[in-house]
Image (cartoon, grey):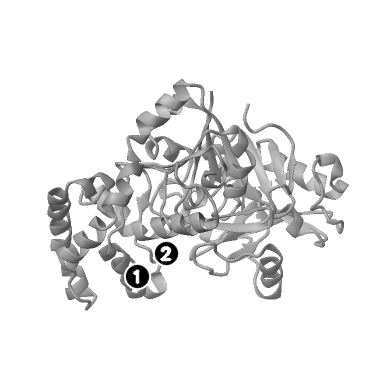
Amino acid sequence: MPAIVLVGAQWGDEGKGKATDLIGSSVDYVVKFNGGNNAGHTVVIDGETYALHLLPSGILTPGVTPVIGNGVVIDLAVLFAELDGLDARGVDTSKLVVSANAHLIPSYNRTLDKVTERFLGKRRIGTTGRGIGPTYADKMARVGLRVQDLFDEKILRQKVEGALDQKNQLLVKVYNRRAVTVDEVVDELMSYADRLRPMVTDTSLLLADALDEGRVVIMEAGQATLLDVDHGTYPFVTSSNATAGGACTGSGVPPTRIDSVIAVLKAYTTRVGEGPFPTELFGDEGDRLRKAGGEFGTTTGRPRRCGWFDAVIGRYATRINGTTDLVLTKLDVLTGYDPVPVCVAYEVDGVRHDEMPMTQTEFHHAVPIFEYFEGWDDDITGARSMGDLPSAARRYVEAVQDLCGAPVSAVGVGPGREEIVAVRDLVR
């Protein structure tokens, strides 16, 4: 049975949680393989809105085993607050499993994230200040703390001591903050050990066994393709691999077991934080699209930057991820726009680029080249097949498919769980 990768094909917030929920009844395991609580999924079920930050969105689907993979960085306070919130709403969270190799976000990295952004001023990246980047940096520098370290306090204390030898120099001498003590870090982390222990397992082995038994495993990315640390708009990116390749390293599932890659796109484009955004709308135009789409961050509440659909980055995401299926969300938000612009290429210093420019400098200076599509005024939230959509809306979906180079297999026509046009089965 298949292992399926689900990624965002823009700058995040495309509706990956809804896509996961759409195929949840066919899936046995949902794996979060990268990121931390710096991104969120919003899922609407029976009129109730669930905002997930660290947990895999499959936790909302009965019978699904949600997995936090080794590629994730975990803030334990956030994890348990999120679990408690779902428990209070009657959601069964007892099946959650956590990789022993996932890294922990200690308090000193949250502090460093915030003070570093302030120190950078105009050169800031636009992070969420939740310690994600510093924790991934520790991982690569081999001074990080892992989940399994909670179960050996001596090892944990040694690792914290080693990390603070350097961190406190930065905090005190560069940022004029107080030094962090080893005891306060260890005590905080150890306070979660007993509750966490029953959830922890070798998730790579668990998933291998599940696939051998014919189970369906979906691996969902946090953030999105254009925020991938290698393939995104660096340096305005996240600190992990949010593309399909990251699903393998972040879960322990090998590439030979992946059957399909589903990429999720909004019918327009948004991004949060700093960095270039060729199709961005400003002023009243941007506010109109932001209000219509409810474009405020699930995790931070920050207003998202909004712009027209960008087929250049759509093609790029299709290529980078090996996309087999596109899920187009929020088509209903474009109702009432006529015409509807779509960016089909860029102009950079008088030269047309049909593909992503090679350098950050070129991308920063990219001017969108638009084609214009007929709009529609009909309410499409009740559509459940392509035939239910107005002809102009169908042509828009077909244009996205043709411009991005992969088939559109589902179209979101509203925020609700059932407000979806299913074109073809996403689990084959």
Residue 209 drawn at (x, y percent) = 41, 25
Vertical side of 398 occupied by 127: above or below = below
Residue 428 drawn at (x, y percent) = 63, 26
Query: Mark 1 packing: few (<14 Cα in 10 Å), some, or many (20+)?
Result: some
Question: Is residue 216 found left or right of 169 in the rendered image?
Answer: right
Residue 171 drawn at (x, y percent) = 21, 71
Vertical side of 300 occupied by 12: above or below = above
Q: Looking at the image, which residue is at 49% across and 45% down?
A: 221
Q: Amino acid at mark 2?
A: Thr
Vertical side of 94 occupied by 427: above or below = above
Question: Which secondary structure lies at badge 1?
Answer: helix
Question: Is residue 168 found left or right of 45 in the rendered image?
Answer: left
Quarter-wise, where is residue 255 in the image? top left
Q: Pick the residue in front: 286 or 31.
A: 31
Q: Pick the residue in front: 162 or 63.
A: 63
Q: How far, Cα to Cα, is label 1 from label 2?
A: 8 Å
Q: Is residue 426 visible?
A: yes
Furthest-bottom residue in this view: 176
Residue 101 drawn at (x, y percent) = 29, 42
Say which residue label 1 marks.
Answer: 114
Residue 387: mark in rendering? none
Say which residue label 2 marks.
Answer: 127
What is the count of numbered marks? 2
Query: Mark 2 packing: few (<14 Cα in 10 Å), some, or many (20+)?
Result: many
Q: Pick the residue in front: 351 or 13.
A: 13
Q: Amino acid at mark 1?
A: Lys
Question: Is residue 405 found left or right of 272 in the rendered image?
Answer: right
